[in-house]
């Protein structure tokens, strides 16, 4: 289970070190590979391979309507298998870095079974400007209390 935010840097080649607490969890699955793909909100999604496989199956079983096909093109079409090197770094492919507007400073955000990877400035903007006034709360969270 991945949770929390880590402020990280991409090196000049687009590599990023996965923090040790997450790296150990990824490696405990028996895989040294993750899948990095695009998200419609202009961030990247990073899945350990075992978490990715059912997602890919669901997308491959979607209907043929244009909206589903467009989502398949983005999520499956942009997906890249990425190996973790011996020091726990992954290379974020250039087309994905460009898609998400990633520069040197990034935010790796735990989202349960996956991560979101944001340009640090975009992440700060999103968090700073997120409010849940009145009717902004999704219906399934009505009455939910922390």
Image (cartoon, helix red, strand yellow):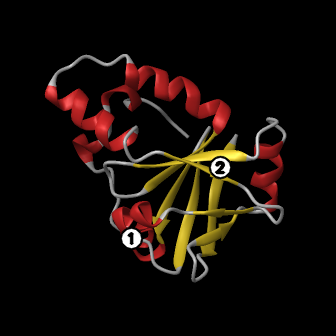
Please give the label number shown on residue 122: 1
- Residue 129 image-quadrant placement: bottom left
Q: In the displayed structure, would residue 103 be above or below residue 63?
A: below
Task: Work out which residue is located at the far left of the displayed protein and give it.
Answer: 66
Q: Which mark is residue 28?
A: none
- Binning the other alpha carbons within 10 Å of mark 1 as few (below 14), some (14 to 19) or many (20 upward) gives some
Q: Please provide percent x and percent y for residue 4.
A: 64, 56
Q: Is residue 24 above or below residue 98?
A: above
Helix, strand or loop status at disc 1: helix
Residue located 65% across and 37% down the image: 49
Residue 88 placed where, x, y %? 77, 62
- Residue 26, picture quadrant: top right
Q: Are marks 2 and 1 in contact (CB under 8 Å)?
A: no
Q: Nearer the viewer, residue 126 or 143?
A: 126
Q: Residue at x 76, y 40 (%)?
A: 31
- 69 in relation to 90, above or below: above
Q: Judge left or right: residue 113 versus residue 72.
A: right
For the residue pair 122 and 88, the one nearer the viewer reads as 88
Image point 61% across, 80% down: which residue? 11
Quarter of the picture containing the N terminus is: top right
Q: Spatial distance from mark 2 to mark 1, Cα to Cα?
A: 19 Å
Q: Is residue 146 left or right of residue 34?
A: left
Q: Position of residue 95 (x, y in %)?
A: 39, 62
Which residue has dot 2 on it? 3
In terms of secondary structure, where does tag 2 sit?
A: strand
Q: Position of residue 61 (x, y in %)?
A: 37, 16
**Quadrant of the image containing the C terminus:** top right
Closer to the chain start, of discs 2 and 1, is 2
Q: Residues within 10 Å of mark 2 (few under 14, many from 20)?
A: some
């Amino acid at each position: 289970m991945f949770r929390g935010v880590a402020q990280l840097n991409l090196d000049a080649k687009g590599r990023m070190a996965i923090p040790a607490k997450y790296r150990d969890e990824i490696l405990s699955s028996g895989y040294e590979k993750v899948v990095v793909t695009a998200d419609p909100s202009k961030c990247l999604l990073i899945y350990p391979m075992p978490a990715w496989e059912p997602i890919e199956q669901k997308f491959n079983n979607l209907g043929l309507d244009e909206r589903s096909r467009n989502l398949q093109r983005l999520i499956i079409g942009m997906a890249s298998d990425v190996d973790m090197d011996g020091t726990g770094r992954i290379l974020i492919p250039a087309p994905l870095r460009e898609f998400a507007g990633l520069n040197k400073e990034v935010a790796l955000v735990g989202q349960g079974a996956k991560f979101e990877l944001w340009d640090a400035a975009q992440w700060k903007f999103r968090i700073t400007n997120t409010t849940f006034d009145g009717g902004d709360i999704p219906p399934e969270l009505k009455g939910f209390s922390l």
